[in-house]
Amino acid sequence: VNNTPHIAIIMDGNGRWAKNKQKQRTFGHQKGAQNVRFVLKHCRKIGIKYLTLYAFSTENWTRPKLEVEFLLKLLEKYLKQELNLYIQNNIKFDTIGDISIFPKKLQNLIKTTKEKTYHCDGMTQVLALNYGAKDEIIRAIKKLKDKQNINEKIFAKFLDTKDLPDIDMLIRTGGEHRVSNFLLWQISYAEIFFSDTMWPDFTTSELDDMITKFKEKHRRYGGD
Ligand code: IPE
Ligand code: IPE
Ligand code: MG
């Protein structure tokens, strides 16, 4: 049995972190990607079984073309660079979101990363790529054939998160108190934590403090 929370993180604040340092936003994204490595390794070490990270939203396409291109290149670099980290630490890589509009080369890299870590069962790390909760729900509805007998449990099997437990802890860094179209269905009973820390500066000790607070919560689920 797994008693550790499924943690989801909206990794926000890369651009402002860089701006505060008089640097380009892209520098912030680079630092942000490095921080994924630290946080992931830490979660593995403390026995977290599921870590879902928001890397690119369906709305992020509206950013300047150069920034979008940079983010896709950075994702490619991250996957190539970190494959061994996943394998060595027995971490399965998975994604949610519609990756079918990404360049074919990137789609293939995502696919092979999944295949090469498919046997890993120490932890699952899910990256949300071209993910939007509303888009996910619409895509699920399009897959539905038998609408009469639908219930919550069956519907959840049509979502991108079909193989994942619901979110226990939702964390947003970067100071904003909003969900930005992330996992609307799956956070229905999540405990939500906001941090003013910009994502590149978010530390594992801040995460540990949140987990401690999470463990003290009495989750009522509408009951007593
Ligand atoms: C989050 O940082 C990373 C992505 C959305 C890809 P931002 O790029 O949103 O940084 P801020 O919020 O502008 O500081
Ligand atoms: C959410 O951050 C998306 C990711 C972290 C990938 P945004 O920066 O896109 O969200 P808004 O625009 O502040 O709502
Ligand atoms: Mg942002």
Image (cartoon, rainbow, N blue to C red):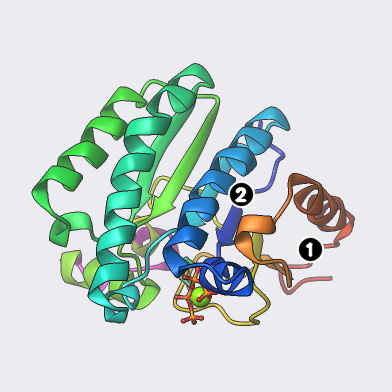
Magenta stretch bounds: 144-154
In the rendering, at what x and y percent does residue 18 appear? 56, 67
The residue that appears at 35% across and 38% down in the rendered structure is 79
- In the rendered structure, find residue 42 and report the number of the disc placed on it: none
Q: Is residue 113 visible?
A: yes
Q: Badge 2: how crowded within 10 Å, few (<14), some, or many (20+)? A: many
**Residue identified by numbered label 1:** 219
Tag nearer the camera, 2 or 1: 2
**Residue identified by numbered label 2:** 6
Q: Main secondary structure of the magenta part?
A: loop
Q: Is residue 149 visible?
A: no
In this image, 67 relative to 103: left or right? right
Name above or below for residue 4 compared with residue 10: above
Q: Is residue 150 magenta?
A: yes
Q: Which amino acid type is marked by label 1?
A: Arg
Q: Badge 1: how crowded within 10 Å, few (<14), some, or many (20+)? A: some
Res 163 quadrant in image: top left
